């Protein structure tokens, strides 16, 4: 019979760390997992488990809860902390199948539970679905990092735009924090800042780098980049929250922007923030037709044009205040 893990095994056999203070229990689990095609590492107690975790690649951990010294809950907490950004699924094995212990397990970060004496099929089903979940996490991270690398590569080709997106991302993050956004929103804002111009990848380099004035058709072509960017990022679920920022970063407060001619509050807040920062960074960067402006000069221009209909005037005022409070030459722009 084809093992449920055979597809994964063709690439690299997933490794499971099994922790129990009773040797026969370890041997039993080891036999079950090995039969299912997994690599198994066993640890007789939490201390040994931490040592193994530090020196091996572990894809999933199955922990007995009742162990002397560091128990399964505490070990789960530590492993989750150590694994940081990487998703390490943890299954707790417990004879104490009551609600209180499950809650303690969930608080410790456990992803699933199995009761003793365990049902082999149930255990393998849970492990299989958690390993699938981990695989998806990794694919997602991988896809995201490819997109981020593409943006950096695209910008690096042009001396004048080099670093623009990452600076916009960093400053958007800074501004979001100044506005009191929660951490989760800050990372969305930062990501949107980095990727706001990703649609330019779909435009001709000759137009993007054209030193002379653009024809009407060429200007229209450039205006496609927000919708192109949205299309590039839309297939990735993890990008869902940043799509409004990408699509609308060229809308204007007075409704004369593009692509949808949204006005005032109907422009998503993320896009209103990016519009200000995008312009600010362009001002303090070197352009083919001029040198860079100082932060003070750029802020003074933005202040003068605050009510010109380009940006959200209230948000612009707050941005200027933040920059005056924080910049004072502390920021370094290209
Ligand atoms: Fe743009």
Image: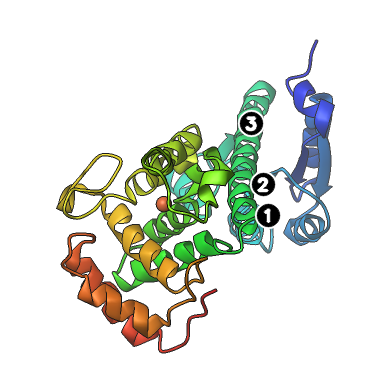
Judge the density around disc 1: few (<14), some (14-19), many (≥20) Cα neighbours within 10 Å. Answer: some
Residue highlighted by disc 1: 67
Which image quarter: residue 113? top right
Specify few, some or many for label 3: CA neighbours under 10 Å numbering under 14, 14-19, or 20 or more. some
Q: Which part of the image, by quadrant, shows the C terminus?
A: bottom right
Q: Mark number for residue 132? A: 3
State the residue at coordinates (58%, 55%).
73
Residue placed most toward the observer, 244 or 69 = 244
Mark 2 Cβ inside 8 Å of ligand 1: no
How much space separates mark 3 and mark 1, taking CA atoms?
Answer: 29 Å
Residue under label 2, please give it.
64
In this orientation, does residue 98 appear?
no
Give the percent coordinates (x, y) of residue 11: 82, 31
Residues at circles 3 and 2 in contact by the CB criterion of under 8 Å: no
Badge 1 element: loop
- Residue at (47, 36) in percent of width and height: 237
Which of label 3 and label 2 is nearer to you?
Answer: 3
Quarter of the rendering occupied by the N terminus: top right
Kind of element beneath mark 2: strand
Separation of residues labelled 1 and 2 (CA atoms): 7 Å
Proximity of marks 1 and 2: CB atoms separated by less than 8 Å: yes
């Amino acid at each position: 019979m084809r093992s449920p893990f055979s597809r994964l095994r063709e690439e690299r056999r997933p490794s499971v760390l099994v922790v129990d203070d009773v040797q026969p229990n370890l041997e039993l689990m080891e036999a079950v997992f090995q039969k299912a095609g997994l690599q198994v590492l066993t640890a007789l107690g939490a201390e040994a488990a931490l040592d193994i975790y530090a020196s091996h690649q572990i894809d999933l951990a199955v922990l007995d809860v009742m162990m002397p010294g560091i128990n399964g809950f505490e070990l789960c907490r530590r492993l989750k902390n150590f694994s940081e950004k990487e998703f390490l699924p943890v299954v707790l094995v417990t004879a104490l199948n009551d609600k209180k212990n499950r809650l303690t397990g969930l608080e410790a970060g456990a992803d699933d539970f199995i009761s003793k004496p365990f049902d082999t099929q149930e255990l393998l089903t849970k492990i299989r679905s958690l390993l699938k979940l981990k695989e998806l996490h990794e694919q997602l991270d991988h896809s995201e990092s490819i997109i981020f690398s593409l943006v950096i590569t695209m910008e690096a080709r042009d001396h004048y735009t080099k670093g623009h997106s990452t600076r916009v991302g960093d400053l958007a993050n800074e501004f979001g924090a100044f506005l009191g956004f929660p951490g989760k929103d800050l990372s969305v804002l930062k990501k949107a800042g980095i990727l706001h111009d990703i649609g330019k990848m779909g435009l001709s380099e000759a137009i993007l780098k054209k030193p002379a004035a653009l024809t009407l058709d060429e200007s229209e072509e450039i205006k496609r980049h927000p919708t192109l960017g949205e299309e590039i990022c839309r297939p990735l679920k993890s990008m869902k929250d940043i799509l409004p920022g990408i699509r609308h970063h060229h809308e204007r407060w007075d409704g004369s922007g593009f692509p949808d001619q949204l006005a005032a509050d109907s422009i998503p807040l993320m896009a209103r923030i990016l519009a200000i920062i995008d312009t600010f960074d362009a001002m303090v960067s070197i352009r083919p037709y001029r040198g860079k402006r100082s932060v003070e000069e750029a802020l003074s221009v933005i202040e003068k044009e605050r009510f010109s209909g380009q940006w959200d005037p209230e948000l612009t005022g707050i941005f200027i205040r933040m920059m005056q409070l924080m910049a004072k030459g502390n920021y370094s722009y290209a």
